[in-house]
Amino acid sequence: MKKLSILFLAVTAFSYTSFAQRSPITVKKSDTRHGPEKGSLIIIGGNVGSQRDIWDKFTELAGGKDKAVLVVVTTASGDSAAYDKKDVEEVKKQTGIKNVTLFHTSDFKEANSEKFIAPLKNATAVYFEGGRQWRIADSYLNTLTHQAFIDVLNRGGVIAGSSAGASILGSFLWRGDTKGAQVLVGDHTQGLGFLKNSAIDQHILVRNREFDLVDFIRKSPQLIGIGLNEATAVLVQRDTLQVLGKSYAAIYDYNTIINSGEKHVVNGREDFTASNGPFFFLSAGQKYDLAKRLVIKEPRKPGKQVAKADDDGDE
């Protein structure tokens, strides 16, 4: 346990600055706490299927199906994905985007070459397919390709990822061990960091993972934990997060975990935007302020009645 705690402290103290002298990544002070300063992230919990609100938002932010320039990163799926275009064809089908390029390498040197990153120079969108997140880290971390991904955001583009492609978007690489996804903190712990100071989990309800991030965030209070169920995503623009899809996103915040956050029940009444537990769920349409670590409560529309719970049961 002592060894694990030391690892948590070492990882959460990590700064891209430490890599500045041996990687081409441009490091600058950020005015956002977690989200990107420019551009958008769409982080998907896996098995997105034909979930229209997710795909439509991605296509819109990419510039529309006729103008978007999309790069689909298949590295997480293994070497065979360099030739198998089924995942790319599925993305083209769901988005209607015409200009789509398959992007794949397992060669770190290739990822660090100007020739390889050419498709990213004019890209308006990047989509990371699922598989194993450590493969993405091995191929692209702190390379010219990594910087080219960041440049897509800096141009106002969108980066999305599903399943393993979601976890790699965070700064701490959750379930990144080469032995398997059952190892929570493994031999790969650095993500691409588009969502700063974060750890991202996926498939949380269908795989009974909803409690897995709790102890980690308890020991790493500067990180935010994001857990996503399947066919569900969060859209992050600057420090505002909004849920898309048909299920739930879970928020793991240190103050909630130690029970010093906003209370779910106050004076005998429920507040559906707070929690007394170690995490809380947000559903489609709900928003969260990542900087303030608070649910954004939408103003009540004139004439709208607030539902009351029955005395003998839930609503």
Image: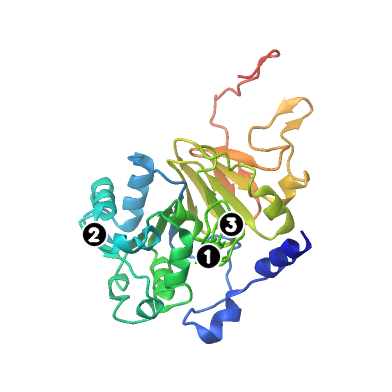
Numbered disc 3: secondary structure: strand
On the image, the x and y values in percent for residue 59 come to 31, 51
* Secondary element type, mark 2: loop
The residue under label 2 is 67
Residue 287 point in image, percent of width and height: 54, 44
Disc 1 residue crowd, few under 14, some 14–19, many 20+, Cα 10 Å: many
User: In this rendering, which labeled residue sits more in front, label 2 or label 3?
Assistant: 3
- Callout 3 environment at 10 Å: few (<14), some (14 to 19), or many (20+)? many
Relative height, residue 279 to residue 144 (above, below): above
Q: Is residue 220 above or below residue 108?
A: above
Instruction: Tell me the residue that label 3 is attached to.
Output: 199
Earlier in the chain: of badge 1 and badge 3, it is 1
Q: CA distance from mark 1 to mark 3?
A: 9 Å
Of the image marks 2 and 3, the number of the one nearer the N terminus: 2
Residue shown at 55% from the left, 77% from the top: 28
Picture residue at 45% right of the left edge, 51% below the top? 163
Residue situated in front as seen by the camera: 79 or 291: 79
Q: On the image, which quarter does residue 239 sit in?
A: bottom right
Identified by mark 2, the residue type is Lys
Judge by depth and name the residue closer to the eye, 241 or 81.
Answer: 81
Q: Nearer the viewer, residue 241 or 76?
A: 76
Pointer 1 residue: 191
| Kind of residue at disc 3 | Ala
Which residue is pictured at 53% across the width and 40% down the height?
Answer: 207
Q: Amino acid at mark 1?
A: Gly
Q: Among all residues in the image, which is located at the extreme top?
A: 312
Q: Are marks 1 and 3 in contact (CB under 8 Å)?
A: no
Residue 182 placed where, x, y %? 57, 51
